[in-house]
Amino acid sequence: MAIVDYSIVMPGFSIALLLIGLWGVITQKNLIKIFISLSIAETGVNLLFLAIAGFSGRLAPIISDPNVTTGYTDPLPHALILTSIVIGTAVTALGLTLTARYFQHKGTLDISKMKELKN
């Protein structure tokens, strides 16, 4: 039975997700597919940040003995990741709402037909 080294797998998987998302943003012409690709890239960034910030062998910062202050992980990166998830969800919701309004106005989701922003 092989033991998986997560310190290599997690950053690699995260970078792969980030690159897949960026490739989708660059190559797609459909607005909804672009927002899905952007969401995939955001997930890759969050996982990469989590892989870098998470140290194996450390405990959650639930301190039961005030005399012991070592061996705990820093909770700040995890709080920043949660904030990033909330902001990403809001940006995706706003983008999809604007996409729906654009479709109602123009009747297409193709960005190659997007010549001007007014009218």
Image (spheres, helix red, strand yellow):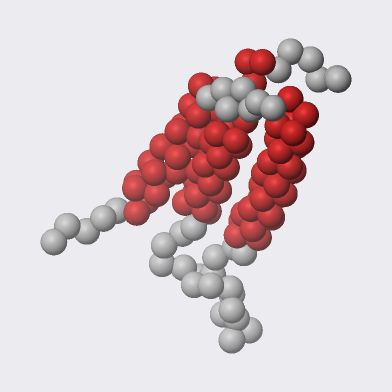
**Which residue is pictured at 50% across the width and 29% down the height?**
24
Choose top left, top right, bottom left or bottom right for residue 109: top right
Residue 3 sits above or below residue 67 on the image: above
Location of residue 100 in the rendering, given as x and y in whole percent from the top left corner? 71, 38
Q: Quadrant of residue 35?
A: top right
Residue occupying the point 34% across, 54% down? 6
Q: Report the side of 110 relative to 19 (left or right).
A: right
Residue at the spot 70% in from the left edge and 47% down from the top edge = 93
Q: Is residue 112 left or right of residue 87?
A: left
- In the picture as drawn, the residue positioned furthest to the left comes out as 1
- Give the x, y percent position of residue 3: 22, 59
Residue 49 in percent (x, y) is at: 54, 48
Q: Is residue 9 above or below residue 67?
A: above
Among the 4 quarters of the image, the one containing residue 67: bottom right
Q: From this viewpoint, which residue is outermost toward the bottom?
A: 65
Nearest the eye: 107 or 73: 107
Residue at position x 65%, y 26% in the image: 108
Q: In which quadrant will I find the N terminus?
A: bottom left
Q: Is residue 25 visible?
A: yes
Q: Residue furthest right?
A: 119
Q: Is residue 79 above or below residue 97?
A: below
Rendered view: 7 above or below 72: above
Toward the viewer: 15 or 32? 32
Question: Where does the image place residue 53, in percent across and percent down from the top left?
Answer: 53, 53
Left or right: 104 as drawn, with respect to 118: left
